Image (cartoon, grey):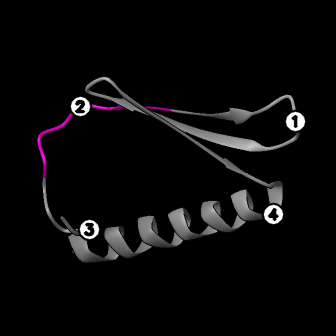
């Protein structure tokens, strides 16, 4: 499965700070829970990548 492979899976995404000063992305889907912790600098890099991807997606719409 790649970035362009569509799947019909419903998932929940939660994002927030942990009590240890990390940023957690928490994904839950079909009985699977995936907590991913990042330090604040890594989280900011991920946010920049998401913004860049959103901008690229907008430009593809036409």
Is residue 60 or residue 4 the one in the foreground? 4
Pointer 1 residue = 20
What is the spatial separation of the Cα atoms under label 1 and label 2, in whole angstroms?
Answer: 29 Å
Residue 29 in percent (x, y) is at 31, 30
Please tell me the numbered disc located at residue 31. Answer: none
Crowding at dot 1, Cα within 10 Å, few <14 / some 14-19 / many 20+, comes out as few
What is the spatial separation of the Cα atoms under label 4 and label 1, in whole angstroms?
Answer: 14 Å
Residue 54 in percent (x, y) is at 43, 64
Pick whichever of labels 1 and 2 is earlier in the sequence: 2
Q: For residue 58, which quarter of the picture?
A: bottom left
Q: Taking 20 as reference, is 53 above or below it?
A: below
Pointer 2 residue = 10
Q: For residue 56, which quarter of the picture?
A: bottom left
Pointer 3 residue = 3
Q: For residue 1, which quarter of the picture?
A: bottom left
What is the spatial separation of the Cα atoms under label 4 and label 2, in whole angstroms?
Answer: 29 Å
Left or right placement of residue 22 versus residue 13 in this view: right
Q: Taking 24 as reference, is 62 above or below it?
A: below
Find out whether residue 12 is within the magenta segment. Answer: yes
- The residue segment tinted magenta is 7-13
Pick whichever of labels 4 and 1 is earlier in the sequence: 1
Pick whichever of labels 4 and 3 is earlier in the sequence: 3
Q: Are marks 4 and 3 in contact (CB under 8 Å)?
A: no
Residue at x 11% of width, y 40% of height: 8
Left or right placement of residue 21 versus residue 23 in this view: right
Of labels 4 and 1, the one closer to you: 1
Q: Main secondary structure of the magenta part?
A: loop
The outermost residue toward the front is 32
Crowding at dot 4, Cα within 10 Å, few <14 / some 14-19 / many 20+, comes out as few
Pick whichever of labels 1 and 3 is earlier in the sequence: 3
Q: Are marks 2 and 3 in contact (CB under 8 Å)?
A: no
Secondary structure of the residue carrying numbered label 3? loop
């Amino acid at each position: 499965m790649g970035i362009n492979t569509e799947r019909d899976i419903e998932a929940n995404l939660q994002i927030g700070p942990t009590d240890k000063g990390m940023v957690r992305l928490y994904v839950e889907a079909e009985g699977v829970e995936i907590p991913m912790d990042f330090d604040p600098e890594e989280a900011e890099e991920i946010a920049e990548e998401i913004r860049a991807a959103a901008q690229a997606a907008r430009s593809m719409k036409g």
